[in-house]
Amino acid sequence: MQTKGVLGQLIKDLCYLPGVGAKTAQRMTFYLLQHDRKSARRLAETILAAIDTIVYCRQCRTFTENELCEMCSNKQRDTSRICVVENPADVWSIEQARVFNGLFFVLHGRLSPLDGIGPEELGLEQLEKKLASGHIKELILATNSTVEGEATAYYLSDLAQQHHVHASRIAHGVPMGGELEYIDSGTLAHAFNGRTKI
């Protein structure tokens, strides 16, 4: 296998993407060079354009090409509710589900003292100013169901309480269409502890 030169570097660089191993990177590289160089050039140009133009929204910290993202500049959204997520991909998922019409706040991570990630690294000073404004009625915590995600949610609920803002946590548990025999014990525990009356 050629590991030097531009070909080897391209394969190595594609391995940087999450979920892409050496074999997948090799297949991608050979496909782009062998079958579709025009699309490969367009992909490269789009990546460069994204790097040069995409920034963080001034208010919610998601990705945008403008000072404010489409959601923060939309006057039809409910500005009294903020949904806190770990990364911009979470915003996209919630937006695609069309279940929330408020605003977002993107942490770009989660509290992890062992990794040196504290409140300052997550922009929580900016979020606290929003909570202190008196305009926010509900803080919806949509961090992941990991140890760090749960710790972050707990920290944020305490922060909301200090500013007399109602904090809620999205439900975690059995997915739609899921069969109990295939659900792990942690997910089942969340589902039982978060059960609601019907």
Image (tube, rainbow, N blue to C red):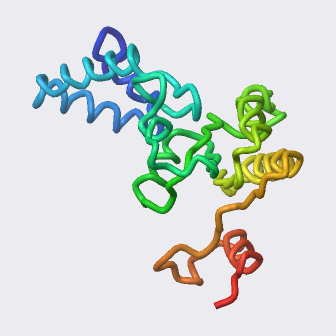
Quadrant assignment for the N terminus: top left
* Total residue callouts: 0
Residue 140 rendering spot, x and y as whole percentages: 67, 55
Q: In this view, does 163 lie above or below 194?
A: above
The image quadrant that residue 112 belongs to is top right
The image quadrant that residue 5 belongs to is top left
Side of 136 relative to 10 (left or right): right
Residue 106 rendering spot, x and y as whole percentages: 60, 38
Q: Residue at x 64, y 54 (%)?
A: 142
Comparing 159 with 19, the one in front is: 159
Q: Which residue lies furthest to the top in this view?
A: 5
Comparing 150 with 17, the one in front is: 150
Quadrant assignment for the C terminus: bottom right
Comparing 169 with 32, the one in front is: 169
Residue 104 rendering spot, x and y as whole percentages: 58, 44
Q: Residue at x 27, y 22 (%)?
A: 46
Q: Residue at x 62, y 40 (%)?
A: 105
Side of 192 relative to 177 (left or right): right
Side of 182 relative to 150 (left or right): left
Q: Is residue 157 above or below residue 178?
A: above
Residue 89 rendering spot, x and y as whole percentages: 49, 43
Q: In this view, does 48 lie above or below 157?
A: above
Q: Residue at x 19, y 19 (%)?
A: 41
Comparing 38 with 6, the one in front is: 38
Q: Which residue lies furthest to the bottom in this view?
A: 198
Side of 24 relative to 156 (left or right): left
